Amino acid sequence: MPNPPRPRRAALAATALLLASALAGCGDNSGNEDLSAQKLNWKDCPAPSPAEGGGEAPSPLPGGAEWQCATLKAPLDWAEPKGDTIGIALIRARASGAEDKRIGSLVFNFGGPGGSGVTTLPAFGSDYAKLRTRYDLVSFDPRGVGRSAPVECLNDLQLDVYFEQDATPDDSAERATLLNNTKDFNAACEDNSEKMLPHVRTTDAARDMDLMRQVLGDDKLYYFGISYGTELGGVYAHLFPKRVGRAVFDAVVDPTQNSEQGSLGQAEGFQLALDNYAENCTSQPTDCPVGDTAQDVRNRIAKLLADLDRNPIPGIGQRVLTQTAATNGIAQALYSKDFWEYLTEGLQQAYDGDGSVLMLLSDSMNGRSENGEYSNIAAANISINCADDKPRYTPAQVERKLPEFRAASPLFGDFMAWSMVTCTDWAVPGASDHPDVSAPGSAPILVVGNTGDPATPYEGARKMVQALGAGVGVELTYKGQGHGAYDSKNKCVRDAVDGYLLNGKVPVAGTVCS
């Protein structure tokens, strides 16, 4: 599924190879080149880089259409557009329909921040077959991500150790360890990526998208943003309201919240998703293997996490399943109802002393492949969040907030509260308390909220509609489970989104799909 927005926790990946590629990504712009006039050199796509998650080159789409890749040259610093440049990695599949029916390019951002669009779009390309009848499907690795001058911090072995640490300290010694590790992590980011860190803000990525629009040959930006991609789309609409074509925001980030409010909202959202999972499991005709009642499921999970805090259990290879890794794995499984069966299996095994399934889920969240290499999703996620978010929190502030977070979620509250110290020692100041997405004069933007979304709670959709401004945001509600709505394959949602993107038919505001 598309890469989810992650809790604001330190978790970064780097290798010498990736560092070399990051340095190679910056070059001298001659000082007079018009980047909007550049021609893209589309070629067969290579296998994903380690920073993109590795693996095989993307397979052709059904019908044989090949994926093509290219690199867009963009300014390193948009305040100095004639200065050094970086490469932005792009991928596309050409429109399948008649040329005279083609609308343009439909640009996707699948979230994170820090997710590689170059690897994610092919993984879900068949889901967008109908949209491809009139659009070239296009996605990209945003700056600091994947092949686009990736941010580097800790190496793979260091990350294995880092992810075993206790992210919910219970005493002063554990708290000191967490804070020291966070400082070391932040220092590694600065040491390895000092040149990139000031230039990975969402506003920078939005300006890259407008350059992309021009180079792709479109008068307007046609856009599909998911999760963090809705924030990126909102910022684009604010900066370039007259250049918005047809746009869809799915799994909507609340643009009115600061990082503390966002973390608290995610704690509530994941707790809601866990409650829904527990109710679903115990309401089936067959016995629920992880609890007799919904409360029993929650109690047993709480006991498991408390036990793991004291005594981790075997995970994969020589690695052990800690409380932090188990919590991470449970959260990952709540991103989609399709993953609930793996959560049940993982809990069953963990109760019997085998942490392998929950660790696999945690590895997926952290961007770790089976060969032990990490993508840079976590590095990019933290770098972009810390560059965007102005607030910086002290341990004392977190401790004062713990009761509120625990009330929001007995299971995820501590985890989300302590994530707020991630940016405290960051080398680059944050830009603002929250993004400005006001977009007077923009074309309508379809905003889709899911009532059961754990990571971007449903209320964010209405806040986005209000923040975009009168006559811009059009709200559609999906009464479902998981992160996002379109990929649930709900026919009502699909028809509304496809109808707007393909034919310009704006749904009635307040439409509800179930």
Image: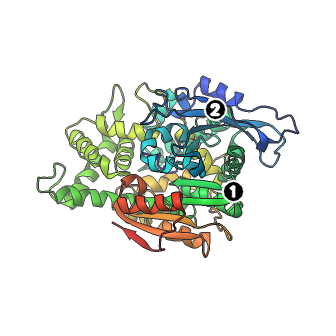
Give the CA separation, mark 2 to mark 1: 35 Å
Secondary structure, mark 2, is loop
Q: In percent of the image, x 71 and y 45: which residue is there?
A: 199
Compared across the picture, whether 351 is left or right of 47 comes to: left
| Residue 116 appears in view | no
Q: In percent of the image, x 16 and y 52: which residue is there?
A: 288
The earlier-in-sequence mark between 2 and 1 is 2
- Residue placed farthest to the bottom in the image? 470
| Residue 88 appears in view | yes
Q: Quadrant of residue 123?
A: top left
Contact check, label 2 and label 1, Cβ < 8 Å: no
Q: In percent of the image, x 68 and y 70: which residue is there?
A: 441
Crowding around mark 2 (Cα neighbors within 10 Å: few <14, some 14 to 19, many 20+) is some
- Image quadrant containing the N terminus: top left
Identified by mark 1, the residue type is Ala
Compared across the picture, whether 300 is left or right of 129 comes to: left
- Residue placed farthest to the left in the image? 286
Front residue (pair 76, 378): 76
Compared across the picture, whether 73 is left or right of 500 comes to: right
Identified by mark 2, the residue type is Trp
- Image quadrant containing the C terminus: bottom left
Residue that mark 2 sits on: 42
Q: Quadrant of residue 39?
A: top right
Crowding around mark 1 (Cα neighbors within 10 Å: few <14, some 14 to 19, many 20+) is some
Q: In percent of the image, x 19 and y 38: which residue is there?
A: 352
Q: Position of residue 307 (x, y in %)?
A: 28, 45
Residue that mark 1 sits on: 431
Front residue (pair 128, 144): 128
Q: Is residue 14 above or below residue 425?
A: above
Q: Position of residue 433 (x, y in %)?
A: 64, 62
Secondary structure, mark 1, is loop
